[in-house]
Image: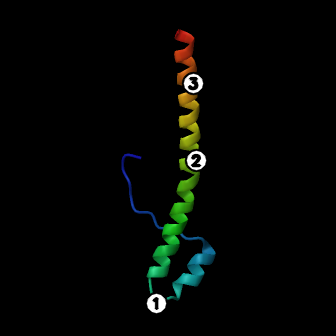
Amino acid sequence: MIFTTPVEAQCAMCRAVLENEEGRETAKGINNGIVYLMIIPYVLIGVVGYIIYRNKRKSATAKKL
């Protein structure tokens, strides 16, 4: 998470369709869509982890009082 590198990923079907295309804008859009779909599970796991952390912290504070 500290260092980031540009990522380009395509499934075999997307690559076959886009290889013979002259314009590269569609390929860039497909790559961005794939990266977007890969990020969603990590964001959801982070949100759930934060909710669990916040609830445990609240219960620990309530026990002290």
- Cα–Cα gap, marks 1 and 2: 37 Å
Is residue 9 among what the camera can see? no
Q: Is residue 19 left or right of residue 13?
A: left
Between discs 1 and 2, the one toward the N terminus: 1
Q: Is residue 56 above or below residue 16?
A: above
Residue 16, x across and y down, in percent: 59, 81
Residue 12, x across and y down, in percent: 61, 74
Task: Determine whether label 3 and label 1 are within 8 Å by CB.
Answer: no
- Residue where numbered disc 2 is placed: 44
Residue 7, x across and y down, in percent: 45, 63
Judged from the image, the secondary structure of the residue bearing numbered disc 1 is loop
Who's the residue at 40% across and 62% down the image?
Answer: 6
Between discs 3 and 2, the one toward the N terminus: 2
- The furthest residue to the top: 65
- Cα–Cα gap, marks 3 and 1: 54 Å
Q: Is residue 57 above or below residue 39?
A: above
Is residue 58 among what the camera can see? yes
- In the picture, the disc for residue 22 is 1
Q: Is residue 48 left or right of residue 6?
A: right
Q: Amino acid at mark 1?
A: Glu
